[in-house]
Amino acid sequence: MIAGQIHPDFWAVARTLKAQIPDTCGGAAVCIYHRGEKVVDIWGGTRDEKGTPWEPDTIALSYSTTKGVASTLAHILADRGLFDYDDPVARYWPEFAQAGKEKITIRQIMCHEAGLYNISDIIDHARRMLDWDYMVDALAKAPPCHEPGEAHGYHGLTYGYLIGEIIQRTSGKPFTEVLRTEIAEPLELDGLYIGLPESEAGRRAQLILSGIQGPNSSPNRVKTYMSSINRVLGFLGLPIDLLQLEAALMPEGIEELDFNSLDFQRVPIPSANGMFTARSLARMYAALAAGGEIDGVRLLSQETLKRATRVQNTTMGRVVPMPMHWRLGYHRPFTMGVKVPRGFGHFGFGGSGAWADPQRNLAVAMVLNSGVGTPFGDLRIVRLSSSAARCADKR
């Protein structure tokens, strides 16, 4: 059963979500703003294997959807004049200048052209990702795997530490504090966390059928999962080096991390462990869809927003086997049967995602807790995004 509120013009979105909710266990929430109005705020299914119903305030781990939130936070600081996108990272983070990285710019970090995506070459075990200081030090010492700016490769697990440390260095405050004071509190959001406070742990959705993560996983399971991705890519005729994909997204010991655990979720990993409600994501992107402001609260100037969402590259990347049309920290939304040329946002492993479309003044967000998908999202968010855009057009 689907609960919540929905404008009649968007009934098709509710039908799409209902078809996606598992019959056994697993749930999801969707929130949509159109022209500044919240037109969809619905949820359904269960938040754990015990059958506990999904609640209005349930928060869910959203993997790489987190990158869009972290990027928005960086743009807010740029808008304040704390840094410029073409500044070298080392201007604010002097230790970063090691190993030939003294000229890498913040822009190159944000459009994935810095060459620091091969996390398997940077850390010896995935558990290092729980230690911010270790990761920052390792990235400062690491050489780029290609000449910065000459190519782009999805910094799937390293992006958050890179942009997160820039945020900390330029603001002089901890990442979680900046997120709270610059986005969550001004917009009065009910669930936007990267580094979950223990006081909010009771609201969590449990990951179900999470595939490669958890105490019951194994190296063989990881290899099987990667092989399945390779077969799909091969069927689609997409050229990709599977070893490159593994090096960027599957560091040694990744199968030993329990993404369901509070130990994983309470530390900030701005690439991968955001805990969100759909309505919080949608409201943030609704501000961006409307030129940077909603309900009298301005996050960004229109000029900074234009710079942030200008396409930086359109070619095939070295990790993601498709052109992502990278902006600064955002990629294009993927849809079927309807075009969103000016849209921007970020999708996540397992099917979550959130994005804005200034052309339609539309913002869409989905969080969920079941399924695996691919490291780049799956068709559930694509179908919902497509339905939302068609409803907005008809409206």
Image: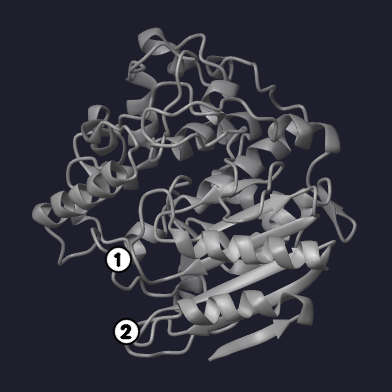
Which circle marks residue 157 in the picture? Answer: none
Q: In terms of secondary structure, where does tag 2 sit?
A: loop
Position of 39 relative to 301 (above/below): below
Which residue bears the numbered disc 1? 210
Q: Residue at x 74, y 29 (%)?
A: 307
Q: Residue at x 21, y 48 (%)?
A: 226
Which residue bears the numbered disc 2? 49
Among the 4 quarters of the image, the one containing residue 338: bottom right
Total marks in image:
2
Q: How is the image coloured?
A: one colour
Q: In terms of secondary structure, where does tag 1 sit?
A: loop
- Left or right, 97 with reference to 40: left
Q: Position of residue 347 (x, y in %)?
A: 51, 52
Position of 287 relative to 251 (above/below): below
User: What amino acid does circle 2 point to?
Assistant: Glu
Q: Residues within 10 Å of mark 1 (few under 14, many from 20)?
A: some
Which quadrant is the C terminus positioned in? bottom right
Q: Position of residue 353 (x, y in %)?
A: 54, 57
Among the 4 quarters of the image, the one containing residue 322: top left
